[in-house]
Amino acid sequence: MLKGFRNFLLKELKEFARDPKILLGIVIVPLVLFSVLGGLMSYAMQSAEESTIRSNFVVINNDCENWSYTFIKFLSSSGSKVFVEENVELNDGKLIELLSKYNVTQALEIPKGFSANITAHAKNPNITASVKFYVHITTTNIFDATRYLPIDATISQFNRALAPDVLNIEKSTIIKGEIKHNVDPATVSGLMVSQSVFIPIAIIILLFYSIQLAATSVAIEKEEKTLETLLTLPIDRLTILFGKLVGSMIIAAIGAVTYIAGYAYFMQSLISKTTPNFVMDLVSLGLVPSFLGYVLLGASLFVTILSALALAVILSAFAGDVRSAQSLVGFIYPIIFLSTFALMYIDAGALPYALRLVLYAIPFSHPIIVSKAVIMGDYVTPTLSIFYVSFFTLALMYVASRLFATEKILTAKLKLKWFTKYGKTTGEP
Amino acid sequence: MDIAVEVSEVTKIFGNFRALDGLSFEVKSGEVFGLIGPNGAGKTTALRIISTLLLPTYGTVKIFGLDVVKNAATIRKIISYLPEEAGAYRYLSGWEYLEFMAKFYTKDDEKVREMVNEAARISGLGERLKDKTGTYSKGMKRRLLVARALMNKPKLAILDEPTSGLDVIHSYHVREIIKKYVKDYGVTVILSSHNMLEVEHVCDKVALINKGKVIAEGTPRELEEKFESENLEEVFAKVVKLA
Ligand SMILES: Nc1ncnc2c1ncn2[C@@H]1O[C@H](COP(=O)(O)OP(=O)(O)OP(=O)(O)O)[C@@H](O)[C@H]1O
Ligand SMILES: [Mg+2]
């Protein structure tokens, strides 16, 4: 087995833990980042609330008595554009059809007996009227999470004008072509926002972090001239390689946890503003991966991070010092960034075949592919994906171990001639 | 006496530059062997090949009969190498550094403690061993590394300019330690140096190399007689000028 691994790993962790730069990256940066993010979010929420007044919806009037017309007039006066349909028997398909007919995402149903109930309320306060509010959530409008919050404000204004608690609202969510009765759309969209923003951001941060750490820990041995001594010790070169990989992975995971905790805190504050009963069976809604899904997602993340680490180690083996190692691995960042976000927001199926192949070939896009697949209950794609990335990672690890096994780790220097030449020719007329 | 190091016809080519060009010499067990020569002669390159860091382009090197290419892992158990330019981990204290190194040679905690205490004595750093090595002066760091290289009592110690950057007192101290280790523990030493006085004092045998070749070899006395010189410095100047 790898002799001296524990000793070496312990040294790696000590070095990381005592480096103020790493503390800065793990503690200070997330704090700053999330206060900024928090500020941005509350700003986004504010502007969303303002824009609600102008948001449009279709009203299905199945009552068609006096009070229903008064209510519709009230809705229109609040600034929203209101399309009215009368006497429609509602089912899932019909509702979606109406929404697309008017190109809106929200519908309000005034049920039969609405006016009668309002009239009766004057005599018996126990009788109340209610309206049904539906929001169609698709992947393209998830950022409108808070748009329809002010429907509550409109209802309470109506109540204030008429009588306290005369009118109730029942909210439902339309998702994946189905009406989920009494599921608050704000909760669902909050969750979807968190999935579509949070997952890629967490993956990107995790990858960037591990790469940075691995590159630094390899290059610092050269910069501080400790590598030569290390390579003559009775310690397997693979121990050194794995020590660097595992050490970086542990610190990156700690970093990721602080980032995720910070992010979750902001998501929580966003969600708790919109709904008190967040605890609901989200798995049954099909919005949260199952246990197997989480296992696959974890496995996918693990092999992807390992591939990033191995790549970082290979690249930094060619650098003489920490700074050049960091600029070398900097070339990986745009690839991670583009592949992650491209797949998160673009439907891969709509891309040209060649471009899709390129995206699938990059290991860093796979956690997103897997996270999308497991939510849809697809476990075949993730399994294939994990196999592919593992294979890719093994190939990289093999290259890295070859580098560490020979004198190349000591003597390899990337020739930057091309860059110098390029810089010179552009400098001259 | 058996042969500790056998360098035969070693050539090392970097790109299209010949750093070593058919270098050959032998070091006997229990001997202190000195490599001297002008800057860029190939001393460090030779020591790096002997310590399994670099591979010879041509030729062979054997350490106690083991081939540096084929038996590198075994050789690493019996040698220790002090690079010409080396650092310690800046966020570890001197103690932690020594302990980290010692643990690669033994699993026994008692032996680790012995080694570390030995190294503490050699380094003469005392209380400063508790401080992070990042706070050490150049000479202090060098003392720590010299101590590290000797603490495990290797069969062969390869020391590239062991006293560079050390003050007079500490250079003297390190030289005495080297001699003591050879005498008491039978350690074989191969070192390079630019300090001819040091070489004369410590080395049993000397090889003068230039442009990757040995151009003169023998005990300091033999060399002085052969080149009719007062001391090694004069030998050096004459021989290098001739070459
Ligand atoms: N990794 C390398 N790549 C290219 N050339 C190298 C490399 N290492 C050493 N050289 C060259 O090999 C020659 C011998 O270098 P070496 O370091 O062995 O000299 P030295 O005798 O130790 O000199 P000094 O007394 O200055 O320490 C030099 O010309 C040096 O430039
Ligand atoms: Mg040298």
Image (spheres, rainbow, N blue to C red):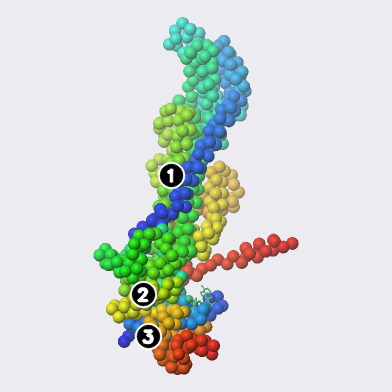
Q: Could you classify mark 2 by the number of other residues whose Cα lies within 10 Å: few (under 14), some (14-19), or many (20 or more)?
A: some
In what element is the residue under mark 2?
helix
Amino acid type at mark 3: Asp
Q: Is residue B33 left or right of residue A349?
A: left
Q: Is residue A328 above or below residue A257?
A: below
Upstream in the sequence, badge 3 or badge 2?
A: 2
x 51%, y 27%: residue? A92
Q: Position of residue A4 (x, y in %)?
A: 34, 63
Front one among A253 and A368: A253
Front one among B42 and B175: B175
x 40%, y 62%: residue? B133
Disc number at residue B204? 3
Q: Are discs 3 and 2 less than 8 Å apart at CB?
A: no
Answer yes or no: is residue A406 visible: no
**Gap in Å between the C-alphas at discs 1 and 3?**
61 Å
x 40%, y 31%: residue? A279
In what element is the residue under mark 3?
loop
**Mark 1 beta carbon near ligand 1 (under 8 Å):** no
Answer yes or no: is residue B204 visible: yes
- The chain under label 2 reads B
Q: Position of residue A413 (x, y in %)?
A: 53, 67
Front one among B14 and A192: B14
Q: Which residue is mark 1?
A: A258
Amino acid type at mark 2: His
| Corner quadrant of residue A57 | top right
Q: Which residue is mark 2?
A: B173
Amino acid type at mark 1: Thr
Q: Position of residue A390 (x, y in %)?
A: 44, 55
Q: Position of residue A72 (x, y in %)?
A: 58, 17
Q: Could you classify mark 3 by the number of other residues whose Cα lies within 10 Å: few (under 14), some (14-19), or many (20 or more)?
A: some
Q: Are discs 2 and 1 less than 8 Å apart at CB?
A: no
